[in-house]
Amino acid sequence: MRSDEPGAAAGREMSQARFGTDIAGLASLAEPTRRALYLYVCGQGSAVSRDEAAAGVGVPRHSAKFHLDKLVGDGLLDVEFARRTGRQGPGAGRPAKLYRRAAREIAVTLPERRYELAGQLMARGIAEARNTGVLVTEALDAAAREQGRELALVALRRGGDSPSDAALLAAARQVLDDEGYETEPAGANPELAGLTLANCPFHAIAVQQTAVVCGMNLAIMEGLLAGLPPLHLTAVLDPAQGRCCVRLAGQAQGGPV
């Protein structure tokens, strides 16, 4: 399968769509009035109306409405409706449209990083080690392999019923690309030549804790491939500058036959 085939293209499109959504949210705050309204809403203890927001930052009501609704569209604010007077029933008037900070978190890193996932896996490993007495590294490896198996299930769902090996490989690459690994074929046929992981989603941590992060990446890939045996790939440690320390070796590189 070449990197320009439909499965790989779909993976890139999904990653690009998610990245574009986050960029749009952050870019929205570059506009000074919009940024001021966002900070005002975030600084209040409860949801605020457009009139309150307009007065709070000193802009016309129509301008506040435009920017607040843009912030909602970009996923930075949520909307709720409530009667501010407390009256109920006929004659109580229409509920007011109120704005509050969205629960959604936005973070953009170039290239993509997944530090939250690393923290979750490490926390799971530490908790398991404390509860069972196993070594933290063993518990972390187990948590990472479980994460890999979960990614395999996602790939199987995306591959559809009775997928071909090529379709399953495309689905697996899509999942890994969504996780920030930026898969690249090591040769014309990835099943033979394997895949390179051009990006480490945990780069900053890997700089300080190389062995821990490389072991975690290896365990994730081992869990993924254990759940996708038709791929005929194997995860191997192969540190190199500028990419993930793990690569997925194909049959021509010592992978399973």
Image (cartoon, grey):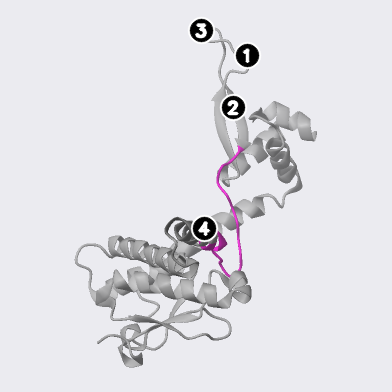
Q: Nearer the viewer, residue 16 or 211?
A: 211
- Label 2: how many Cα within 10 Å (few below 14, some 14–19, many 20+): some
Q: Are marks 2 and 4 in contact (CB under 8 Å)?
A: no
Dot in front, 1 or 4: 4
- For residue 245, the mark is none
Q: Nearer the viewer, residue 62 or 207?
A: 207
Q: Quadrant of the C terminus?
A: bottom left
Give the residue type that dot 3 points to: Pro
Dot in front, 2 or 4: 4
Q: What is the distance, in whole Å, between disc 2 and disc 3 at their CAs?
A: 19 Å
**Residue located farthest toward the left when viewing the structure as drawn:** 162
Give the residue type that dot 2 points to: Lys
The magenta span reads 101-118
Q: What is the distance, in whole Å, between disc 2 and disc 4 at their CAs?
A: 40 Å
Residue annotated with mark 4 = 123
Residue annotated with mark 2 = 97
